[in-house]
Amino acid sequence: MREQGFTVGEETVTRDTGVYGMPDFGGLVNKAKDLAGQHQDQVQDGVEKGEDLAKDKLGGKFGDQVEQGGDAVENFLGVDGQTDDQQNDQPNEQR
């Protein structure tokens, strides 16, 4: 295996590649989850915009399924679906 690197902002990200140059997707997924955890509000905004776009393109049909898909993305990335402001408004026993 060999290691390749690329830059995201100011951070250099490296990935292991196998014999055929395929990236280690597990490592990339973990990095995506880490970044999503650090930027939850941005992830939630992006998922919401994606949901709105999909609903618009589908003419308002399948809205429940689109929202389920957005929830699945947030769950996979470890984002809880609430902004930091919404979490701060809840009593501690509900968190």
Image: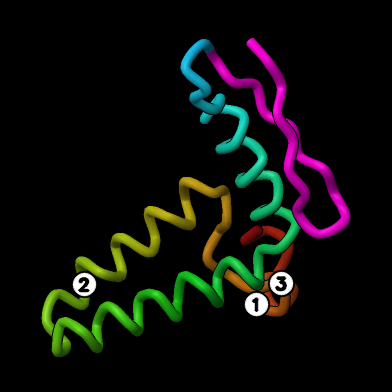
**Which picture quadrant has residue 41?**
bottom right
Asked if marks 3 and 1 touch (Cβ < 8 Å), the reply is yes
Q: Is residue 5 magenta?
A: yes
Mark count:
3
What is the x, y in percent for residue 89?
A: 70, 79
Q: Residue furthest front?
A: 20
What is the x, y in percent for residue 38?
A: 75, 56
Q: In which quarter of the image is the C terminus?
A: bottom right
| Coloration mode | rainbow
In the rendered image of this protein, does residue 18 appear above or below residue 56? above
Q: Main SS of the magenta segment?
A: strand
- Residue drawn at x 62%, y 35% is 30
Part of the protein shown in magenta: 1-18
In the rendered image of this protein, does residue 34 appear above or below residue 66? above
Instruction: Tell me which label, 2 or 3, sits earlier in the chain.
Output: 2
Could you tell me which secondary element the residue under label 1 belongs to?
helix
**Which picture quadrant has residue 65?**
bottom left
Badge number at residue 84: 3
Name the residue carrying label 2: 64
Q: What residue type is labelled 1?
A: Gln
Q: Residues within 10 Å of mark 2 (few under 14, many from 20)?
A: few
What is the x, y in percent for residue 25?
A: 52, 30
Q: How far apart are marks 3 and 1 (CA)?
A: 5 Å
- Residue drawn at x 85%, y 49% is 11
Badge number at residue 86: 1
- Residue drawn at x 24%, y 88% is 56
Could you tell me which secondary element the residue under label 3 belongs to?
helix
Q: What residue type is labelled 2?
A: Asp
